Structure formats: C-alpha cells, structure tokens
Image (cartoon, helix red, strand yellow):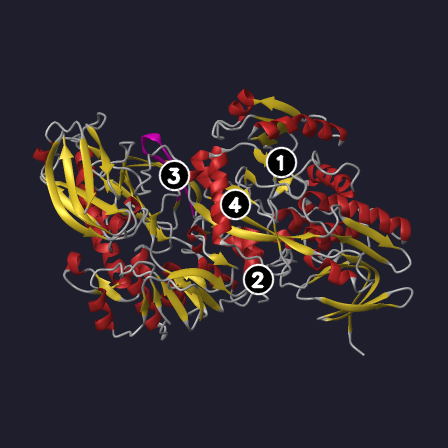
Amino acid sequence: MRDTIANSRAVIIGGGVVGCAIFRRLAMAGLEPVLVEAATDILDGASKGNSALLHTGFDAPEGSIELTCIQAGHREYLAIKDHLNLPLVESGALVVAWDEEQLAKLPAIVEKAHRNGVGDVVQIDRNELRQREPFLSERGLGAVYVPGEHIIDPWSAPLAYAHQGLAHGGQILRRCRATGGEFDGSRWNLQTTLGDISAGVVINAAGNYGDLVEAINRKSPFTITPRKGQFVVFDKPAAKLLHAIILPVPTDRTKGIVACRTAFGNLLVGPTAEDQQDRGRADVDRAMLEQLIAKGVEMIPGLARHSVNAIYAGLRPATQFKDYQIAINRERRWITAAGIRSTGLTSALGIAQMVGRSFAENFGGMRDEEPIWTPVPNLAEDRPRQYLTPAGGDIVCHCELVTRSEIVAALDGPLPAGDLGGLKRRTRCMMGRCQGFYCGAQVLALAEGRLLS
Amino acid sequence: MTTNSDVLILGGGPAGLSCARALRGLGIHSAVLLERESEPGGIPRHCGHLGFGVREFGKIYTGPDYAKRLADEAVGADLRLRMTALKLERDGMVRTTGPNGPEDFQAKAVVLALGAREMPRSARLISGERPFGVMNTGALQQFVYLHGTCPFQRPVVIGSELVAFSTLLTLRHAGIKPLAIIEENERITARQPGKWIARLGFGVPVLTNTRLIRILGRNRVTGIEIDRGFGPERMECDGVILTGRFRPETALIAPSHVEIDPGTSGPSIDAYFRCSDHHYFAAGNVLRGIETAGQCWREGKAVAGMVMARLENRLPLREPDARVTLQGPLAYVYPQRIYRDAPTTNPLLFKARVTHAVHGRLSVVVDGSVVWSRRISALPERRIAWHLPYRDMRDCQQVSVELDAA
C-alpha cells in the first residue's frame, strides 16, 4: 500500500497555462484543487514557447469551442489584468496581403471576423497600411486591421493564475508525474511519481502528453503530434520598427509566421510549424532560424541591421482534429481539456470557465469565493519596473535590468522558481542580449541550493 | 536631482579607468565615473590569469591585480559603483539608476567606455536544444574566478581568438583540460598561437576547418556535432565554451540619438573619439570588438586629451570635412568622420578589419591621391592599424580606404 500524499475534490494534471487557469477557477470556487506537474516547474511544456498574443478569435473556426474559449478568455483577461498587475500592449494586428491573390482574400477575412462577433475589424488600403507601419516592406498591398489583438506577458499571466489558485487554498505539486490511476466508481486513485492522490474528479490538462494522460481513463480518441514552432527574438532597438502584430493571410494548417513586438520590448518572428513525434525535444535548427530571419527581413527590411537576442522553440499539442478536445465524463468523473494546439494563452481563462461550469453542473459543491488578488511583479517594458524605484537599484542582469531583490523574491514565496528556466521566466534574468555573459554566474550563485534541480 | 560635472565616464574597465586617471593628470578634477558592477575593473576583474599590464606598467599582472591597479590610479575621480546608465540624452544628460534609485547626471563631455561582450549562442544560431553547460568565456571566468566553481569537466572550446587562450588558462586554473579547440577557419585567429600553446604546454588538440553544427543534450550538454568536411560527426563532451566574436555593448547607445556604425556596430567617431553628438566621446572596446586591455587603456588616455581639448574649445564644432568611404572586403574603418584640424601633436590613427581572410593592398585615398598604402595579410578578427600625419589629409573633401584583394 503506497502513501496517499493528497486528497482533493479536483486534481488537475498539467501545470501549463490551461492547467493553471483551471486551477485558479476551481480554487476560487472553494474546491481546494491539487495541480500536479511532471516537470520541476510549471509552464515548462507548450506554455514555455508561444508568441504571447491575446487573440480576439476573428479568424478562429466558426462555431468552434476554440472560438468560444478565446472570446471568453479575452474578456476575462481584460477584466482581471489590473487586479493581477498583468500587462496589455494594445498593438492591434494587421493581416497583411503581400500579393494580389492574398489581397483578394481580405474581404472574406473581414466577413468571417464579423460573423465571429469581432465587429471592429476593417480592411485598410495600402496607404493606410504605410501610415500605420512605415517600416513595413512596400510590398504590402493592403491589410485587415484587427484592433482587439494585443500583446501580453506569456509567463506572468499563468504564474498569476497559479498564485491566485494557491491563495484560494489550492496546492501545486511539482516533479509529480501522473503515471496511472484507478476509478472505484466514486473516486480516482491517481498514481504519481510522488505517491498516490485521491481525487473526486480528474482534469486532464496535460498539453503535449494529453493523449497519454487520457489513456489513464480511456483509450484516447485523439493522438497528440507535437507541432514545433521556432522563434527568433531580435534585440530591443528593433521593436521601434513595428507597431501592430503582423499576421499572414492564414492557411488551413497554421496561422503562419507572425512578426510582433513583445511585452518585454523586443521584436519576435515566428513560429515555424514542424510536426514531430518527440514530446520533449524543443530544439532549434540553424537553417530554419535563417529562414525565419529572412522572412522577417522580407516583411520589415530594417530588421537586417538588428541583432538576434534569443532563439527558442515551443511544442504545440496538435491532434488530428482542428478544434480543442474538451469533454466531460460524468460517470467516470473525468474532464478532458486537451489538444489546445494554439491560442491557449488567450483561451485558457475561457477553457477554465467552461470546465468550471461543467464541474458545477455535473458534480456541484462549488461556491463563489470573494477573490483574493495576487498581483505579480511587472516585467513589461511599457510599465514601471522595479529598477526605477528607490528600492531596486541593485541590478544583477544588466540587459533586462533585473534587480537582486526581484531574483531573491522569485526564489521565495508560495511558488518559488523550480529551476533556472522558471527563474528566467519569473524575472527575465539571463534572457537579454548577452544571455548570461555578465550575470549567469551571479544568478546561479543566488539560486544555489534554492532550485529543485 | 541632477549631478553636474565637466566629465562623466560611463564604464569602469581599462578604458574608463585610464581616462579618469589621465584627466586627473591633466588637471581636470570635475569628473564622475559610473560603474554598474560592485567593483571597478571591467573584464580583467574576472581574468584571474597573468597577461596584463606590460605596456602600461612594465610589469605582468593577473587580471584582478591589473584591475586593482587601474582603479587605484583612477582615484580622484568620483567613482560611483552599482550605477546603471539607462538613457543617453542630448546635451550630455544621462539618466541612471543605482542603490538610491533613479538619478540624473549631466556633463560637458560624456565618455562612453561601455566595453564589449562575446556573441552568445543565440546570435550564432547554433542548432540544438538548450541544455545547461553552454556559455561564453566571460561567464566561465565568473564561475571559476569569482565563485570558485566550474560548470563542467570535459568541455570543448569554440573559436581561436586570443580570448580562447584566456579560456584555456581559466580552465587550467579549475584543473580542467578541454577536449579540443574548434575553429571554423583554416588557421588560428590569435597571433603567435604556436608560441602560446608551446609555452602553456596544454596539448589541447586544435581542429581547424571545423564547424560546430549542433549542441546535443536536453538538460545537460552530452555532446556536439561537428563537420570537418566529411559530414556530421559526434563528439562527446559536457560543456561548450563559445569564445570571441566580441561585439560592442551598445544597449545604451542603440536606442539613443548617438549614431552607430553598422560596420563596427559601435558608435561612429571622428579622430577625436567624438560621437555624432559632440557631447559624447567613446573609448575602448565599445568602439569595436575587441582589442587588448592595453589598447583600451591607451585609448582611454588618448580620449582624456581630446576631452581636455573639448573643454578648452579647441575641437571643431562644424560638420565633418569628410566621411570615410570603404572599398573592397573591409568590415569597417574608424574614425568614420574626418576633420583636417589637428588638436594635438598626435597623428591620425586609423583602425580597420577585413570581412574574410585576405591578402592584398590597403590604401588611403584623399581627394583623389593615394597618400598611404601597404600590403596586408589579414584575418577577420585581427586589427589593422596605421598612422597618418594630418598634413596628408589635404583639403579633406573625400577620404576613402580601399582594399584590393590580390
């Protein structure tokens, strides 16, 4: 008989943005959920490498669960961002037509946006495009302007959700991989690498491992084939070359390669879309990166003069289906929130609402707690950072202007950084143009003995 | 609150400290030096091996001892530590933050002595995952000399500029012998490498004509893939040290109004080390990546003389007489702007680098006449330097530096 390490009415498998948002929602409903994450820190899988956009759903498949969740998530993000001290760079987006064929498709994009309820979307001509984006290549023939698409901080947002869930009585277990489970007709006994967990309901938010976790409950009706996206991040001076998010005219398969600023003041180009079998290998490839840079320069010629700050790859949990795989099995007390192959950063809060409603309808016992707000430190460039305050003068990371007290704080508290990646995502240390040339050793010395790995 | 002074120096490495010392020697006492680290000295501070100071002090020092001597000699300037400059503005106004929070400084002359850093993995676009154990020499030295740890046991060293030998010395200090030095070009970049290797007795194999293709490993480095011209080969190792390919630290300059030269990727200057905004001067490795600490020290001293000339209104304030144009495989030449006026008795000093390994004839053409020329054999990361008397600048309407590859 193994030890039961936790007992909860709701256990969420997966600490990505979707898992964290569900965790928050269920905790705020008084369920005291437990979130289990296999890695040494949350946000270590698909949520680690995305394009950090807050979408409107203007181009989402009509009538899809994805569209519903994107729009609910977008609304809730705007409603809670100030309470959680989360940024919003109100950039808008431009779907740019680079040739006549694409130009001919723009009216249909506007119509679809309107049918999707995004009524402020309009087509603009070449001159207006030039006015809005003077550094964009002159090959742009026109665009669809989407005012509601914004740029956010991809890590602070889910981190804030996790913190709020903890404040409402939830528990997060890291380095805790779900390996199996049995349902006895009323409860799940979930086996994990840390021990057994007794769960009233299990919620699968396991991202790139979604089908494997689903197999604990049933033969998975979907198969995850991770889709790798590589990104190139240009140094901060490049950010002045762009205002809006530049989107391509979409194809069926992917939203295509985007160019946009980041909340941290850089300029990003990506992602690629490469299917692979390995669920953990997020490697970059020089030839692909060179293609991305060439694509970026093609869109924004001035980029050629700017240097590359960072390169990264993310794995998106794509399935054989276009839409999200969200389902509830009342009898077996199992909820599936899988196959969030894209747009998860925006839709997570909407998915959490959907899961919360579903939980209430099927299992009940939820209440609305008075929100306890857990604001996170601001890392966005357009709002005051700690280094500008009298308390924050002692800078450790000079590229990203990260202070010693920010790093110390991220190693402490209810959800301290579990590994170096988590520390970087919480503070931005070592994420700048020198990638740790100056501060790497000092950061590791500060973190000595404080990380799980 | 704004602190006013005659001179503000940004950066307390060899160039900045030498400038501070020389200013005092010239009788300029209103000088403030801002350094962002908690100790002055710059990069030599973490080069714990010998090799510094021969030219400046006639004696061989370790990096930290050299840094200390530079700092001791700079005493007199108002040295402010842990001060980070945030923004350069017109008229010599510099916004900063430090232990007491935000603070402004304004000076008649601001000297940018911001240094350089090695190109990180990201900018080199090296394929692979992101395991721990990939770093530049700068980070390695901080591990070894400042924190007494070493992040790996069997690393490989990428690149063979002079700094690669600093890497070897650092590793030896940690009791570690790297598996190999890997160099893309057909020969080693550093001058007199044979002498270095013989003297140090490392016996580390040097693989030339070898490209690093991919870093292997997910959490820790487990190996690399290299190409010696016969397709990918695997080499087991537990660390990768990316040396050299220094670039000026222009985080502060690039977003400002001060012009950057796309060739050097540092600020463009005139022969008085003055930037496009005449309130700003630049010295040391922020001008280009990179030269030795000794060269930076000399530049810091030279800049002090020019700052003096500026304070005495001896420098021309007009537009430059000529902008230097380049022809042939030249990566850069500086100064980029030329005046015919000679403010000191020193001749004009040109420095240049080539884009690829080349043999050929380098010439300076002023107003249509070749005033100087020399045969060269150069590698991309090696400096080419020459002097010209101001009289050779003639009317100085057109100045071009030309390299005819043989």
- The kind of residue on which mark 3 rests is Ala
In the foreground, A349 or A385: A349
Which of the numbered marks, if any, corresponds to residue A386? Answer: 4
Check the image and report above or below for B339 versus A54.
Answer: above
Are both tags, 4 and 2, on one chain? yes
Q: Position of residue B121 (x, y in %)?
A: 44, 55
Work out whether residue A367 can be spotted.
no
Identify the residue position indicated by label 3 in the image: B254
**Residue at 85% of width from left, 53% of height from top?**
A328
- The kind of residue on which mark 1 rests is His
User: Is B97 included in the stretch rendered in magenta?
Assistant: yes
Nearer to us: label 2 or label 1: 1
Identify the residue position indicated by label 2 in the image: A419
**Crowding near pointer 2: few (<14 within 10 Å), some, many (20+)?**
many
Kindly report the distance in space between the C-alpha atoms of the residues bearing marks 2 and 1. Answer: 29 Å
| Mark 2 secondary-structure assignment | loop
Identify the residue position indicated by label 1 in the image: A150
| Mark 3 secondary-structure assignment | loop
Q: Are marks 2 and 1 in contact (CB under 8 Å)?
A: no
Q: Are marks 2 and 3 in contact (CB under 8 Å)?
A: no
- The kind of residue on which mark 2 rests is Asp
Are both tags, 1 and 4, on one chain? yes
